[in-house]
Image: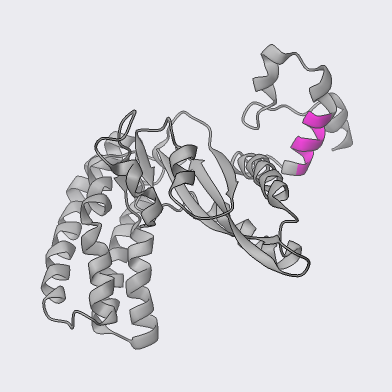
């Protein structure tokens, strides 16, 4: 499964003017279900947020993807997609955020109640983090499913009682419209409740914008995406990015091509020179 997210990436354009590009990320992190594959992230740059970009990024992918409700992903889920449709997994953190804003800003009783119910589900997820898929699925069926079923009934009841044009109705509709994708985690221990694998991968980008302000050009955006891929993948594997990149750049020119995988973050062993410097 991959977790996806995107964020804006301002570019310099005609002197002091800027235009808004996008950075997309796709993250594989099997650690929540004790999976065998090492975590990794990849970033792509684009000049806009149209559907053509995730379609190109994921042209060969046809399993599971966890993402927000961005309409640009919709074609990926269509039944006639080739080689096969991607199975949509929605994010409970996004659903919770709609209700949290109601609870925090308006003290809305429905918002407060919805947040409490969703938080109870996340509490179970914290307990089962790192367990094998079969155990996670069993616990979810036993403990989480009754809570989810009750939440679904409650949300539908509340939706009939509030103004259809109000913020509360919109928050409820967000969850109900995604309900099948939201509850999918109950039946598959590999899935997470949220796409929190991808969102932290975007956090350094949002923080970094305050320092570097914008990419210098389209090519600068693409280079930034490549560097972000290296840095974030190293971090996901608890490898210091600066030490790793300094070492592999020094060794790469003379390294045997058939052994290049040894330099990947999850396989990397520091060189003798670097160990001595440390």
Task: Identify which residue is drawn at 28% across, 72% down.
Answer: 171
Residue 122: x and y, percent? 34, 58
Q: Which residues are magenta?
A: 242-249
Q: Main secondary structure of the magenta part?
A: helix
Quick check: is 250 in the magenta stretch? no
Frontmost residue, 266 versus 161: 161
Q: How many marks?
A: 0
Which residue reaches farthest front? 14
267 to 208, vertically: above or below: above
Residue 16: x and y, percent? 76, 70
7 to 135, vertically: above or below: below
Task: Identify which residue is drawn at 13% across, 68% down.
Answer: 156
Residue 143: x and y, percent? 21, 52
Quadrant where the N terminus sits is top left
270 to 159, vertically: above or below: above
Task: Identify which residue is drawn at 24% across, 38% down.
Answer: 79
Task: Identify which residue is drawn at 71% across, 46% down.
Answer: 219
Frontmost residue, 199 versus 124: 199
Residue 164 visible within the image: yes
Residue 269: x and y, percent? 72, 26
Quick check: is 247 in the magenta stretch? yes
Which residue reaches farthest bottom? 106
Q: Is residue 151 left or right of residue 125?
A: left
275 to 97, vertically: above or below: above
């Amino acid at each position: 499964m991959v977790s996806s997210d995107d964020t804006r990436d301002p570019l310099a354009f005609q002197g002091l003017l800027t235009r808004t590009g996008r950075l997309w990320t796709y993250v594989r992190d099997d650690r929540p279900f004790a999976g065998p594959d090492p975590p990794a992230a990849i970033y792509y740059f684009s000049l806009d947020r149209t559907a053509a970009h995730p379609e190109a990024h994921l042209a060969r992918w046809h399993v599971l993807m966890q993402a927000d409700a961005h309409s640009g992903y919709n074609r990926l889920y269509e039944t006639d997609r080739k080689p096969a449709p991607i199975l949509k997994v929605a994010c409970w953190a996004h659903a919770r955020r709609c209700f949290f804003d109601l609870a925090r800003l308006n003290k809305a009783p429905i918002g407060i109640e919805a947040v409490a119910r969703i938080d109870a589900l996340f509490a179970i997820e914290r307990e089962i983090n790192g367990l094998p898929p079969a155990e996670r699925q069993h616990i979810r069926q036993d403990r989480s499913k009754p809570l989810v079923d009750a939440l679904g009934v409650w949300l539908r009841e509340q939706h009939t009682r509030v103004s259809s044009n109000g913020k509360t109705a919109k928050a409820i509709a967000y969850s109900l419209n995604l309900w099948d994708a939201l509850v999918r985690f109950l039946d598959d221990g590999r899935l997470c409740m949220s796409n929190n694998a991808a969102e932290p991968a975007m956090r350094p980008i949002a923080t970094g914008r305050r320092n570097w302000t914008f990419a210098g050009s389209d090519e600068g955006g693409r280079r930034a995406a490549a560097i972000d891929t290296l840095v974030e993948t190293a971090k996901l594997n608890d490898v210091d990015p600066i030490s790793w990149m300094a070492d592999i750049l020094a060794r790469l020119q003379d390294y045997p091509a058939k052994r290049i995988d040894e330099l990947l973050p999850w396989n990397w062993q520091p060189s003798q020179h670097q160990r001595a410097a440390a």
